[in-house]
Image (cartoon, rainbow, N blue to C red):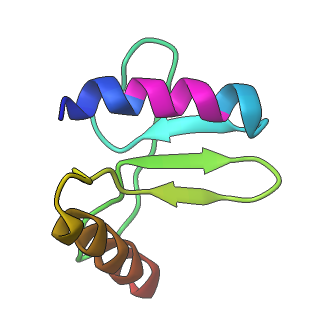
Amino acid sequence: MDERAVQIEVSEWLEQHANGSVYWSENPTEGFGRFNMNSDSGRPDLLCTGESNILIELNDGDDLAGIYDAMTQLHRYWQS
């Protein structure tokens, strides 16, 4: 999985369909801002702001463990 390519695709889709602004946690590509948050457990890959705020952690879904890992990571971010 090319995570950067997926981040671009997801970011563009969110801006078009979720009517929100997308921010990246690290090294945003052209056209996207960057966000920061104080957390001992790291940061999610993307933040979409709008009517609702959405945190996104991108993990490879070819292995079910990747999907499980993303869910537990997001929960740790929420707890921090």
Measured as percent of width and height from the top left, residue 31 is found at 52, 15
Region in magenta: 8-14
Residue at x 40% of width, y 52% of height: 36
In this view, which residue lies farthest toward the bottom?
A: 79
Vertical arrangement, residue 16 with respect to residue 63, above or below: above
Visible in this render: residue 60? yes
Front residue (pair 65, 40): 65
Residue at x 30% of width, y 23% of height: 5
Measured as percent of width and height from the top left, residue 47 is found at 52, 49
Measured as percent of width and height from the top left, residue 8 is found at 41, 24
Visible in this render: residue 33? no
13 sits to left or right of 5: right
65 sits to left or right of 79: left
- Main SS of the magenta part reads helix
Residue at x 32% of width, y 60% of height: 43
7 sits to left or right of 65: right
Residue at x 28% of width, y 38% of height: 26
Vertical arrangement, residue 8 with respect to residue 36, above or below: above
User: Quarter holding the C terminus?
Assistant: bottom left
Vertical arrangement, residue 12 with respect to residue 70, above or below: above
Measured as percent of width and height from the top left, residue 37 is found at 41, 61
